[in-house]
Image (tube, grey):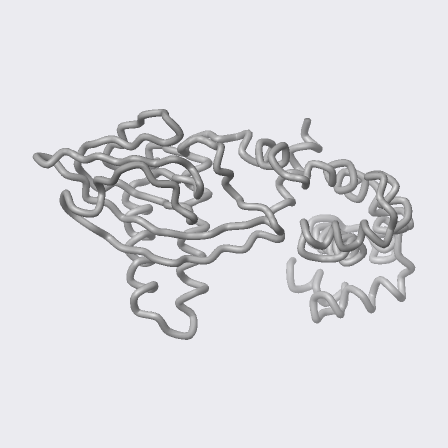
Amino acid sequence: MEQSLDMTGRLPESLTVNISYAQYREGFPGWNRTEIAPSFHRFYFIAEGSGSVVLNGVTYEPKPNQMMIMPAGTSQMALTNQEDPYSRYFCHFDAQVGEWPLFSADSQLYICDARDPGFIERTFTELVEQFHAGGPFSVLRTQACLLTMLASCLEDGEYTDFWKDFIRQTESSKLGDVLAYIHKHLHEPMEIELLAEIVHLHPNYFIPYFKKIMGVTPMHYVQRKRMEEAKRLLSYTDAAISDIADQIGLQLAYFSRQFKGHTGLSPTAYRACTR
């Protein structure tokens, strides 16, 4: 089970996010809507007010200090009380892992109480301000804000099976055994033919298939994982550099060249910087 959770945690490496709109709005207008199925995801933080949403036929009543994710393609209706209308922060966005949407159209409403509503409100305020202000780094800042809040929503709501559900809903489930094998056998030679055989594909088909899902080629992924393991061993153990090279299946000279190309530092210099 521990290995399974570890591998699912590696899947967001090919995650891409694009924000199309962000705003803070008070009052009745703009919330009430008849049944729609938008092509983008919606993320909300409710500041105050009362009302309801219906998503895929299930009714919810969002409360102040709650976050919620409304996946694209879901059937949605929304109502708010004219006597006590919602004040809310909201964001429209697209999110994919490889070729697959992060949230599927047959999923639920992800809704939870924010453990730190002040932090979420400040982060959402920054997202809205950066989105409308623009500038050379606004995209990076708005994406960072959104990703932080999405993670908070899934964590605070204890959606612990989110990545397992994602795997089941996409073709990436076929890669589970491949990723587990790579993780377990980093210290051994890694051949494309062997990885392709795990999912019963010809290597010529396996390479573009893997890249479509993970965003990089299989051997690029293996090399990156080896370098990540090397960085961990250099930072948190006293193992000799030659032993670390052995543990990730590389000759010492080749490991040193690859590590410097990956980090800009030699293994010795990297260890000195992290101690």
On the image, the x and y values in percent for residue 212 come to: 69, 53
Quadrant hosting residue 69: top left
- Residue at x 70% of width, y 64% of height: 270
Pick the residue in front: 202 or 66.
202
Say if residue 234 shows up in the picture: no
Q: Is residue 30 left or right of residue 13?
A: left
Q: Is residue 221 left or right of residue 125?
A: right
- Residue at x 48% of width, y 31% of height: 159
Say if residue 128 shows up in the picture: yes
Location of the C terminus (image quadrant): bottom right
Counting the numbered discs, the total is 0
- In the displayed structure, 147 sits above or below 179; it is below
Quadrant hosting residue 129: bottom left
- Residue at x 22% of width, y 43% of height: 31
- In the displayed structure, 220 sits above or below 136; it is above
Quadrant hosting residue 198: top right
Pick the residue in front: 184 or 143.
143
- Residue at x 72% of width, y 69% of height: 265
Extreme residue in the left direction = 83
Q: Is residue 33 left or right of residue 262?
A: left
Pick the residue in front: 196 or 229.
196
Q: Is residue 70 left or right of residue 200?
A: left
On the image, the x and y values in percent for residue 123 come to: 33, 52
Pick the residue in front: 36 or 141.
36
Extreme residue in the bottom direction = 136
